Structures are given as C-alpha cells and as structure tokens.
Image (cartoon, coloured by chain):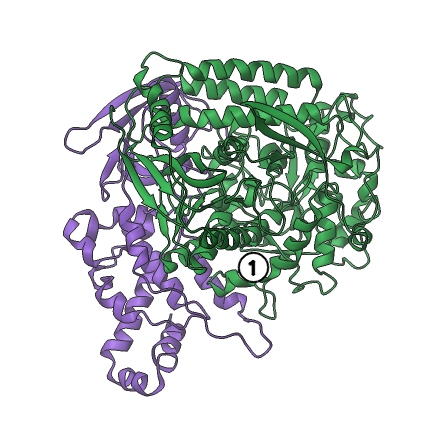
Chain colours: A purple, B green
Amino acid sequence: MTVETTPKEVTLRVWRGEDRGSGAFVDYQVPVDPGMVVLDVLFRVQAMRAPDLAVRWNCKAGKCGSCSAEVNGRPRLMCMTRLSGLPLGDPIVIAPMATFPLVRDLVTDVSFNFEKAKTIPAFKPAPPGPDGTRRMYQEEVERVQEFHKCIECFLCQNVCHVIRDHEENKEAFSGPRFFVKLAALEMHPLDTNDRLELIRMKDGLGFCNITKCCTEVCPEDIHITDNAIIPLKERIVTQYYDPLAWVKRRIFGREESTRGRADRGA
Amino acid sequence: MAEPHYDERDYDVIVIGAGGAGIRAAIEAKGQGARTALVCKSLFGKAHTVMAEGGIAAALRNVWKEDGWDVHFRDTMRGGKLLNNWRMAQIHAQEAPDRVLELEEWGALFDRTSDGLILQRDFGGHRYARLAHVGDRTGLEMIRTLQNRATELGIDVLMECTMQRILMDDGHVAGAFGYWRQTGRFVLLHAKAIVLATGGAGRAWRVTSNSWEYSGDGLRMALDAGADLMDMEFVQFHPTGMVWPLSVRGLLVTEGVRGDGGTLRNKDGERFMFRYIPEFFRAETADNEAEADRWYENKANNRRTPDLLPRDEVARAINAEVKAGRGSPHGGVFLDIASRRAPDFIQKRLPSMYHQFKELADIDITKEPMEIGPTCHYFMGGIRVDADTTATTVAGLFAAGECAAGLHGANRLGGNSLSDLVVFGRRAGLHAAQFAAARRAPGAVDKAELDAAATRMLVPVERSDGEDPYAIQNDLQGTMQDLVGLIRSASELEEALRRLASYQERLDRVGVRGGVRYNPAWNLALDLRSMLTVSEIVARAASTRTESRGGHTREDFPKTDPEWGKRNVVIRRKDGALDVSIEALPEMPADLRGVVGEQPHPKEHQGAVESTQPAGLGAR
C-alpha cells in the first residue's frame, strides 16, 4: 500500500444555484483525511458548511452511476475520484454536468436519457432450442457483457459534443449510452428484433464522427466507439449501401444478410 | 406554503421501491392489466440491487445434477437456524429457477458453462455451486434487465419521489403521500393496492454497505398503517466489508471471493475458520485445509471449506479474532485470493473487486491480501407477510424483498436475496393486482389528514435555527454501531433505547435552511423519522430475544435456546405505542422436517463467548 500525503485541509469550489444564469461557484475549506474521494469531501461540506448542498449519490462504490459531475473540468464519478489524484494546492472545481438542465447545485435533470430509453425496441428472443434451453457460449456473450457493464452514469452523454454544444440535436440523437445499448441488443446472440433503420434515422448514429470523447470518460472502460458505435455504423453501411446485401436481405431476411456478416466482421 | 398543492394521480397498484423486488412486482401487476406506478426514491436503476455482486441462488442443476429445490430449501432453513417461515423457503427454492430463466428470456446474459448453459458458483451455506452470476456484477445485470422490461411495458416510473405515508380508508389502503425530491412538491397517489419493496434500514449503522436511501421508510410506513413487523432483531453483518481507508469502510467485498477460492487468515497467516466450525455444520464442513481445498473441485468426496460457513458464523469468527488481538493493522482480518488463484483468473472472475481495491485502496488483489471486517448489510426481519400471497395484515398492503420478513429466518444465505426479490416480487405484483381488480373503487382520502401531514413535513424548513439533521444522524449511527451491533447485551440495548429517545426529542426540534427543492438536509430530516423508529424496534426486539441465534448474538445469553426456536418476536403499534409480542412460528410439515434435519445444538452459537478470551484460547 502506498502512503499518501494529503494536506489537512482542501478548498472545494462548488457550483451553487438553481439556474445557470444566477448561480455561482462558492469556496468551501474543509478538513480531509487520507484515502478520501471527492464525494467524501462534499459530505464534509454538507455536515460543516452547507447542509442544503444538493448532490445526487447512492452506492458510493462506482456501481450505480449517480454522482456524475465535472471535477476540474473533467467528467467523473465523484465517488471514484480520489483526492490523491488531484492537485490540491488550488481549489478543486466541481460543476454539474453541462449537457443536462440544472436542478440545483450539482444535480441535473437527466430525464432526457430515460425518455430516449423508451424509444428503443426491446429485446426479442428467438425460441428456445429443441431441449428447451437457450444455449449461448461464453465467447459470444462476452462481447455483449462488455456493454452490460454500463452503469448509466451518463458521463458519455454529457461529454458528447453533438448534444453538449447543440441543444437542437437532442431530438434526433440518442447519444453514446444508447448506441451501447443498441449494440448490446443487436449483438445479443438470441435477439431477433431489427433496429437498423431506427439507429440510422431516429437515433442519429450518423451525427457521431468518432472523436472518442465518450470512450475516454467511461468509468467502466467500455470501448464505446470501437466496439459499439463503429460496428453499428458498419452494419448500416452493409444494409443500406451494399446493393448485394440489400437484395439478399429482401430474399433471406436479416439473419442471412446483415447480422451474420457484421458479426463476423466485428 | 400556505395552501399545499398536491400532484395527484390515480392508479390500481402502486409499488413503492424500485430495486429488484419492486420492479418485478410492477412488471407483474402491469402484466395483469393493473394501472401501475413504480415509485423510486432515486433515479430508476440505481437502487441497492445494483450493488449485489456474487449471484442469484437457484437450483438450476447446470453444474451439479445432485442439486434440487429440496437441497436449496434445506440449506436456506439451516442457514436461517430454522427460524425461517418454512412455506416461504419452500416457494423460494421451487420457483427460483424459473425466475432466473425468465431474466434470461428478458435479455440477461449470465456467465456460461462450457456447454452453453448458465454457470453457477459456490457461495456460503450452499451445498452445491448454485449461484447464477455475471462476474461480480450480477445485481447490475438483474436490475438493468428488469428496468428494460419495465420500460418496454410502459410502466409509469416516478423517479426521485419519496413516499412518507400510507393512506387508509375503512381498514383498506387508499393511497400514499410523499414528495418529489427535485421540486419538494407533495404527491398524492390514489391506489387500490400497494406493494412495499423498500429494503432495510442499514443506514442507521456507521459501518454499512447500505446507501443513504436505506432509512426504513417502508418498515415505518407499514407499522403506521397497522402492519406487523417481525424478526427485527436479526440484522446481517456481512463478514467481508472493506476496512481501509476509512472513506470506504463498510464497502462490500463479495462472498464470491471465497466462493472462487479465497481464504480468511489472521495476522499470523492462520486459516482460523477451522477453529470456528459449529456442531450444527460439523458433519458437512471440512476440518482440515487439504480437504477444504479439494472441495472446490470435488464436492462428492469432500466437505465444504469453513470459509464458506453462513455469514453469521464467519462474521462472529472475524470479530472474535480481532478482539483476541489477531487482526490486521486496520482492525479487520485478511482475505487472501492472491496466493491461491492466478491473476488472470481473479481479474476475470472478480473484475469489480479488482477495480474497487485498486482505485480506492491502492491494493492489487492479485498480488496482496485484502483487509476486511464485518459490515451492516441486510435486515432478515421486516413486514410480516402471508407466505403465498405476500399480503400483510393490512388489507391491500403487500410487501416483498428485504422489507418483508420470513424467508431468511435468523440469517440469510448469500445469493438468496436476489432470488427472493424476483420470486416474491412477482407474487406481490400478482396478488396486489388481483386484490385491486376485486375492489370496485379506490378508498376515500381524508384531505384534512393530508394537509396536516404536509404541514408537519414542512416544519423543519420553517425552523432555521433548529437541531442539525446531520449531527443527529451521526450520533444515531454511532449508537447503533456501538450498542446494537454484532454482539449485544441487555445493558447496552437499554442504553441504546435511552439515547434513541433523546435523538427523537432532538428530531422534534430539527431545522434546515435552503427550502424544499432538492435539499438533502430536509430529506434527511424526514428520513430520520423512519430511521429512529426502525432503530428503536431493532433494539426492542433484540432485548426481547434472550438467546443467541443467527444474526442476533447476546453476550449475556450466548447459547441457542430450543424454545426460542419456536418463537418470533412481533412488534406492532397499539394505541400509538409499540407493542412487543412473542408469537408461535408456523410449524413445518413432517416430510419437510425430514429434509432439513436436526435442530441447532444448544451450545453451538460460536464466536460470542470467545471474544472475551485471551489470544490462543479461542480454539475448540
């Protein structure tokens, strides 16, 4: 175990307010102990300085994805951001996620994400095998299990410039979290639903120009761009712009044309 | 706020609590055609189920053909020291496999066996490898699968909405009343039936694996509505929580570490669990290291490692080792998988444990042992329910999951919680929907009662110089940790009750500033009412049960008493005051008694008495 040198006090510069126009950053100096994460220090601020400071959190273990915020300008889970990894001579700046409407202080209204979730066609499994079981092999589920690691912290949504800088794109763009979800469904060994037309049009996959900002901030290290977005783009290219595949699809349906090919290619 | 303005909605069934049990209940109620609302205290998909790690117990028989519902039933009853409601344990063991396969049907991807079926892992107290799992993030897979299903069905989900009160009309539930966290606005939900799935109240302890939500709202609301609470003295302290750094003290370390080969050691490197095998489990537990290690590969000819005794046994053993001076530097013991399994195996099987220790404690668990100790984890007790229907004693009120009592008896086996959630969550949703369908009209709501409740809830925000809710919570957590913890005594419980009364007086004077809009101080002031009520009930139940059994250990009554093995402690509100009664446990039919085997031995509750002995004398 490494011995950490933590100063006895740090200053947090925390966004306070109920709207972005009238709110402001406020400095709080509080004592700290070794091993603390940013969320611990915010609890100290609540207990000692500002009892009404609004922070959303739950598990405090990096598993629920509730405490997303921007720490020194970088989107992070506050429960997994240790003080030892931050420069402590200067104030630690903590701001709410910029892409979502502000509720109060560090809490934002993330309902955009739950609304998008409702538009995604659900999992539709193939019937069980002749022995009544659904056999899947570890190698084929592992790729999808990577996507299922998503804790819905929405940091990828927050950092995606398609919606971070352009409110007007929210209508026709689902964002990286839902590309991961769509990829998980499309690559599920048992799924039979077809979502490619929706992915192309309504979910706005074409807006993504693979700058990988989402991948960089993912606390679960999901390779969002390489493993979810790019394979989905490839499937769309295959289905919509490859004339041979188009004809095959008309004759044999999805299994023969897009699914099998893209699976092998991914 | 002079004229409270309520956000008013009308449903057939409302489900309060959106962990595994609540979501499963809502799915079932909606499937039955009921107009259903699912109320979450947090965002959807963030409830405590998301933190479950090791797996979901079900006798699928994919790994061991010898397994079956009867073996699972037997393990559950014995783990619970036979205080379980036998019928719940039977239903649970029989229905769990179907509920797991249903999750697969809805898109869950469990780890696989080599022939493509759901893989199962070893866990404490389970005779065979029985836990379907996804690495060490099974709860996430489960809650997301259920969440997706609920979204697909179009269930109304009320997020960041805290219910405070169940409304009654002529002996039937009529609705529930609470507030939106984001705005502070009051919410009135009319309903013909209500399912409570609100979990426990582990937040009242200092070292806990539970989050802020776990304040026991559902337990307190059920009590206020006239329901019985049962077995409240049984609180599970999970043996392996992190102990260092302080910031993460209590954070859960999955039992899967031991299921996958990890072992407990004291500071001398000794695998001390061999000294703590109780008589009740002696016949099925290995008494030497070689046999214990062989058991992982060959269960037919070897007995189970004592590292995987039920949680209550392991937690007391750790406590005894630490008190005897054989603990680790930060007051725990060592959990070692690094010296026993290859690094790539550990990273593959326990990715989130690897990540958690690496990120939060600078420990590489593939190279070094972890330091762990007991952490408050789970309420075995809760709302008394009918085994088949999950109905409480209040008409129209149902309960499932951790907030319901009975299935786990005096101690819950790991993996039996996730299966509990889906088995009884489904039943709760089904019976609530049927109950609602049989009621013609929703009950009437007394608006004057609502206005009075709303006014009371607003008192703290109108008192700016009152008691600080954070200070009350801090003191409460200290008291429950020190006096109502793993080992209890009459004098400490009395002292706890005295202090709890003083916190209640302080809570009556609580004040917060900053209004009602997403104000955690106000939310805490309201939660504290539930936390204090439930804490008092735990202490009262604990002082009533004058024996040691499962998750309840009395220093002054260290033995298990067969007479207490036939009794439940039941607490209800009578004329405004708490009424404690001792009631007969339902008797198990003879054929099932044969499956379960003998009663616990009177002298077998270990660990409690050892704790007072000097080092070296703890061995038996």
Query: Which image quadrant for residue B180?
Result: top left
Does the rendering let one see residue B87? Answer: yes
Q: Is residue A54 found left or right of A37 in the rendered image?
A: left
> What's the chain of the residue with tag 1?
B
Query: Which image quadrant for residue B353?
Result: top right
- Asked which secondary structure carries label 1, the reply is helix
> Residue B69 at x, y = what percent?
70, 58
Above or below, B407 against B456 in this view is below
Position of the C terminus of chain A, as image quadrant, is: bottom left
Q: Is residue A147 found left or right of B485 in the rendered image?
A: left
Rendered residue at 47%/57% (across/down): B28
Above or below, B241 against B419 in this view is above
> Residue B17 at x, y = what percent?
45, 43
> Residue B416 at x, y = what percent?
62, 49
> Residue B296 at x, y = what percent?
72, 54
Rendered residue at 69%/15% (across/down): B491
Rendered residue at 25%/36% (across/down): A103
Kind of residue at disc 1: Arg
Residue at the spot of label 1: B99
Q: Nearer the viewer, residue A144 or B472?
A: B472
Q: Pointer 1: residues within 10 angstroms few (<14), some, or many (20+)?
A: many
Q: Nearer the viewer, residue B461 or A40?
A: B461
Q: Nearer the viewer, residue B105 or A155?
A: B105
Above or below, B53 against A185 in this view is above
